[in-house]
Image: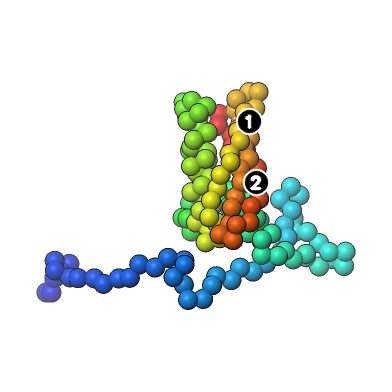
Amino acid sequence: MPNLFPQNMEFEYEEKSIEDLEEPLEFKGSYLFDFEKGEFVKNPDGTIAKSNDLEAYVQWCNKTMYSPRYKLAYSDLYGQEFNKLIGTLLSKDAIELEIKRMTEETLIVHPRTREITNFVFKWSDSKEEVFYEYEVITIDGERFMLENSVKVR
């Protein structure tokens, strides 16, 4: 029987980055969603309102931050892992660093994301929840602020 795991195989591959793509990435719009109401935004005639490409990206960021990672409906790259912070005995500073790291890991997978920065944290009086805001910068230099909260106790 031939060896299934040959020792002396050579592989050739070429590394490419987003800048190396021959065709530029094309971002499209989507349908507007109201996260507070939990429903799509409707036009006066009853049709669902559409968003432009930046609004669609902002919605993707929000939806990704609301979605737990490793659920069957999505790839393992999609969503956040804030549930790992519940009940930990980490200090406030350590929890804030973990929230920052998890937020960056969650959003950086999108090809439009360049940087996540300017985090500001505010703790609830009970110290059971952290409210935070941050700035997202796109590869085109567009900037917008997002805010989230994480239960930690």
Left or right: 22 in relation to 136: left
Locate residue 135, reporting x and y percent: 61, 46
Is residue 83 in view from this perspective?
Answer: no
* Quadrant hosting residue 43: bottom right
Q: Residue furthest front?
A: 141
Q: Residue furthest bottom?
A: 22
Residue at x 42%, y 65% (from the top left corner)? 17
10 Å neighbourhood of mark 2: few (<14), some, or many (≥20)?
some
- Check disc 2 and report its element: helix, strand or loop: strand
**Residue pointed to by mark 1:** 122
The amino acid type of the residue labelled 1 equals Lys
* Quadrant hosting residue 48: bottom right
**Residue pointed to by mark 2:** 146
Specify the color scheme.
Answer: rainbow
Image quadrant containing the C terminus: top right
Residue at x 72%, y 63% (from the top left corner)? 51
- Check disc 1 and report its element: helix, strand or loop: strand
